[in-house]
Amino acid sequence: DQQVKQNSPSLSVQEGRISILNCDYTNSMFDYFLWYKKYPAEGPTFLISISSIKDKNEDGRFTVFLNKSAKHLSLHIVPSQPGDSAVYFCAASNFGNEKLTFGTGTRLTIIP
Amino acid sequence: DVKVTQSSRYLVKRTGEKVFLECVQDMDHENMFWYRQDPGLGLRLIYFSYDVKMKEKGDIPEGYSVSREKKERFSLILESASTNQTSMYLCASSTSGGGGYYGYTFGSGTRLTVV
């Protein structure tokens, strides 16, 4: 049972434009949502997170939006840069539970 | 610079061998995790540990075991390697109460091929 889903396996965006990565979840008990970025042959690195009491969190070029009623979150990258080309994973957890449940990932390619 | 170190980047093992994957963290984190990453399946949790000598099964523990004798070290053991265990293995750690919001720190991964 895939509790966290990323339905787009890949996405291509022109450099300088906005990249929007989407993630859906089924467990309404999740309290925290996170995005990770992964380059080939490296471990994932933490990008940004949001708690379920918020609907938006920003960090520089990265903004995460949470729509609890739709059980949907998205990551916006503006402007997109070539170094943003990577696989992005969304993840979720419950308060007090250290385990993260990951989605299947979206490969983002930024076209120069 | 804080880090999680996995002992091998690439490993090739034969079917039936006992395989040890080692992970060491220098952040004094309480929690440590082993995930595997496969195309189209994302990251799936194998085992985790929230304290020395403590372990809990994740979503796909079959065919694996773990050992945590010291706080900084978490080992994944493939009792009898099989070809369906060919994968990228990722170790991670987190501080108690922080993993859910501040996330994990991951190692660089071990690409294991079982032939």
Image (spheres, rainbow, N blue to C red):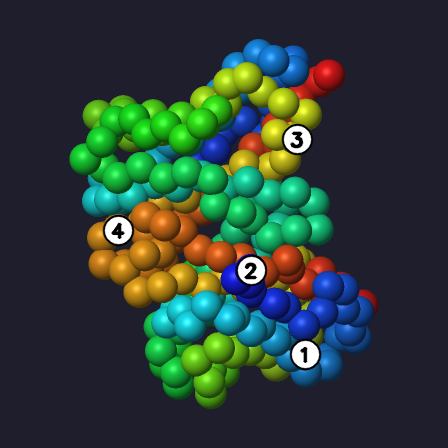
Identify the image quadrant of the C terminus of chain A.
top right
Q: Is mark 4 on a helix, strand or loop?
A: loop
Residue at the extreme front: B1
Return the disc, 1 or 2, that comes first in the chain's sequence: 2
Which sits in the foreground, A76 or A16?
A16
- The residue beneath circle 2 is B1
- Report the Cα–Cα distance between label 4 and label 1: 33 Å
Residue sitting nearer the eye, A42 or B46: A42
- Report whether mark 3 lies on the same chain as mark 2: no
Q: Are marks 4 and 1 in contact (CB under 8 Å)?
A: no
What residue is drawn where x is 70% and y is 51%?
A41
Q: What residue type is labelled 3?
A: Gly
Q: In this view, does A21 lie above or below B67?
A: above
**Residue A97 % position (x, y):** 27, 59
Q: Distance between the residues labelled 4 and 3?
A: 31 Å
The label nearer to you, 4 versus 3, is 3
Mark 4 highlights which residue?
A94
Q: Which residue is found at the position 61% from the left and 76% from the top? A: B22
Q: What element carries label 3?
A: helix
Q: For mark 3, what is the residue?
A: A83
Report how far apart the C-alphas of labels 3 and 2 lie in the structure: 22 Å
Q: Is residue A107 above or below residue A19?
A: below
Q: Where is residue B3 in the image (x, y as percent from the top left)?
A: 55, 63
Q: What's the amino acid at mark 4?
A: Asn
- The residue to which callout 1 is attached is B19
